[in-house]
Amino acid sequence: MDFKIVWTLRSREDLHDIATFIAKDNPPAALKLGDMIFARVDSLEIFPELGRVVPERNQANIREIVVRVCLNNQFLGLVLGFTGLFDGKRTNNGRMS
């Protein structure tokens, strides 16, 4: 069974902010990063258990995927966090409670 991916407003804003920051110096890299992230997230529709369980939470439905990106000859690791069940509650610092 395929699952539906629902992007939260915060995740869309975060992706936009990251891509905008990178595009200031390297617009093609920003597009490539966006494409990579969308491809990894889209794969969750078919493989919802992709990625590793977040060690700090130790719950099977809270996972993360690391996307490695090379910018200016430096490798960066972006962590995409996701959950199978999202209740929408956040603490004051923006993290899930």
Image (spheres, rainbow, N blue to C red):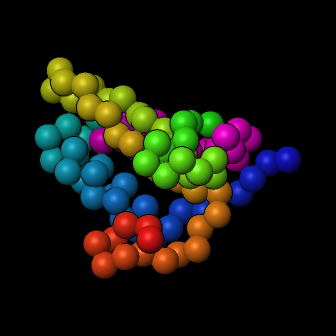
User: Which of the pair 92/71 is nearer the observer?
Assistant: 92
Residue range highlighted in magenta: 30-49
Q: What residue is shown at x 28% (from left), y 51% (from top)?
A: 18
Query: Relative to 38, is 50 above or below?
Result: above
User: For this view, does 64 lie left or right of residue 94?
Assistant: right
Q: Splitting the image into 4 quarters, where does residue 72 fall?
A: top left
The residue positioned farthest toward the top in the image shown: 73
Number of callouts: 0
Q: What residue is shown at x 41% (from left), y 34% (from top)?
A: 67
Is any atom of residue 80 visible in this view?
no
Is residue 36 part of the magenta span, yes or no?
A: yes
User: Which of the pair 33/5 is nearer the observer?
Assistant: 5
User: For this view, does 93 lie left or right of residue 66?
Assistant: left
User: For this view, does 45 lie left or right of residue 34?
Assistant: right
Q: Quadrant of the C terminus?
A: bottom left
Q: What residue is shown at x 29% (from left), y 49% (from top)?
A: 19
The overriding secondary structure of the stretch rendered in magenta is helix
User: For this view, does 30 lie left or right of residue 39?
Assistant: left
Q: What residue is shown at x 85% (from left), y 47% (from top)?
A: 1
Coordinates of residue 75 in the picture (x, y in percent): 25, 25
User: Which of the pair 51/20 is nearer the observer?
Assistant: 51
Is any atom of residue 91 visible in this view?
yes
Coordinates of residue 77 in the picture (x, y in percent): 32, 34
Is residue 56 part of the magenta span, yes or no?
A: no
Coordinates of residue 36 in the picture (x, y in percent): 46, 36
Coordinates of residue 13 in the picture (x, y in percent): 36, 65
Query: Relative to 67, is 85 above or below?
Result: below
